[in-house]
Amino acid sequence: MATLELRQVTKSFGDTTALQPTSLAIPDGEFVVLVGPSGCGKTTLLRMIAGLETPTGGDILIGERRVNDLEPSARDIAMVFQNYALYPHMKVRDNLTYGLRLRGADKAEIARRVQWAAGLLGLGDLLDRKPSALSGGQRQRVAMGRAIVREPQLFLFDEPLSNLDARLRNHMRVEIKQLHQRLKTTTVFVTHDQVEAMTLAQRVVVMNQGRIEQVGTPGEVYAKPSSVFVASFLGAPGMNLFEAELGTDRATLHIAQAAPLRLSSPLDTAERALIVGIRPEALMPDDQGAWQMDIVLREALGAETMLHGQIGNQPCVVRLAGDAPWHEGQRIGLRVSNEALHVFDRASGVRIEP
């Protein structure tokens, strides 16, 4: 196992900047997830750690060793790809052992590692099959097994679950989490799926337009997003965002066609044009509530119900537990708690603390 450190790492393709100066320290044994929309730079960053891309600037250190100029094979890492990258003509056993044989490992050591990985991932009955005879989840486990037998310092996952159906993705998330708990190997996992990020990560790195927006535990980035982007990206559905004007007392938020919101304490900002954020689960039904929402869509999901509508002229989603009794065409009163409010500067999108 090893630490991973990025020091002002950048990447450009001609005149296009794919990654702005990025610094990040990952301690030994941590599971970190890079999450963000397509084109945010997360896969480019992972490929530079792996040695598949060369940084334009900055340093990459694995176990305090600068690896910028090292070939991927010399970095002591193992990578699991989105498309699994298995050899179709080889049986599972040969897929697992191929890299070890290339490195000249002796037969006894190869057998030990394969038996260990097969037992860990439930591959014992699949060793004599070819990839074409495996399900998507089984192929994913073989790809993970091929990485595990290397016993590397660092695991890199590049959107490994995106080709699986929803049920299998959920199952594989649990397997990957349990695998890390057993091995405790430093892991960097790339995904665009915020559910994967929140459920897998010890720390989440939210990326946007080639830079890091926020780093923190899943609980931290969800409860206290640093920007409008993080607030809207993390959460299913994302945070409700309303344009608001700050009153002259700096403690009242005025939202078009909705009752004003009174803050517990004045905001220390000169800006008047703000964004107010409220998580869907923080809006509570109340006949006497200050806000009224006309329901235009009801999503019944079994364990919860999503109500879509508008507050004033701005869209809003309310998440309620269980089978909520409200339906399309009805109006629902909502109570808003001051403790549930998140305030951002409208121009910069940056969070404003009370």
Image (cartoon, helix red, strand yellow):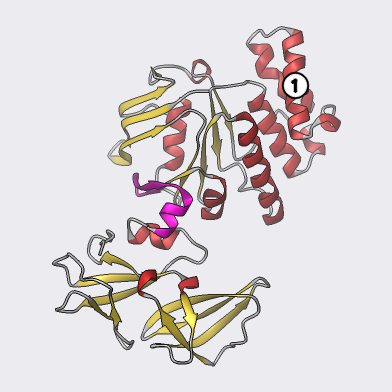
Residue 129 visible in the displayed image:
no
Mark 1, residue position: 114
Closer to the camera in the image, 171 or 217:
217
- The answer to whether residue 163 is left or right of residue 331 is right
Closer to the camera in the image, 291 or 169:
291
Closer to the camera in the image, 270 or 236:
270
Closer to the camera in the image, 295 or 89:
295
Image x and y of residue 68, in percent: 38, 21
Q: Residue at x 43, y 42 (%)?
A: 42
Image x and y of residue 80, in percent: 60, 33
Q: Is mark 1 on a helix, strand or loop?
A: helix
Residue 298's image quarter? bottom right
Image x and y of residue 238, in percent: 46, 65
Which quadrant, please, contains the C terminus?
Answer: bottom left
Stretch of the chain drawn in magenta: 206-223
Q: Which residue is drawn at 72% across and 23% down?
A: 96
Q: In this view, does 232 lie above or below 80?
A: below
Q: Which residue is drawn at 25% across and 67% down?
A: 346
- The answer to whether residue 240 is left or right of residue 170 is left
Q: In this view, does 6 lie above or below 296?
A: above
Residue 67 visible in the displayed image:
yes
Which amino acid is tagged 1? Val
Image x and y of residue 228, in percent: 34, 62
Residue 220 inside the magenta-drawn segment: yes
Residue at the far front in the pictured view = 264
Callout 1: 10 Å neighbours few (<14), some, many (20+)? many
- The answer to whether residue 170 is left or right of residue 295 is right
Q: Is residue 12 above or below residue 311?
A: above
Residue 351 inside the magenta-drawn segment: no
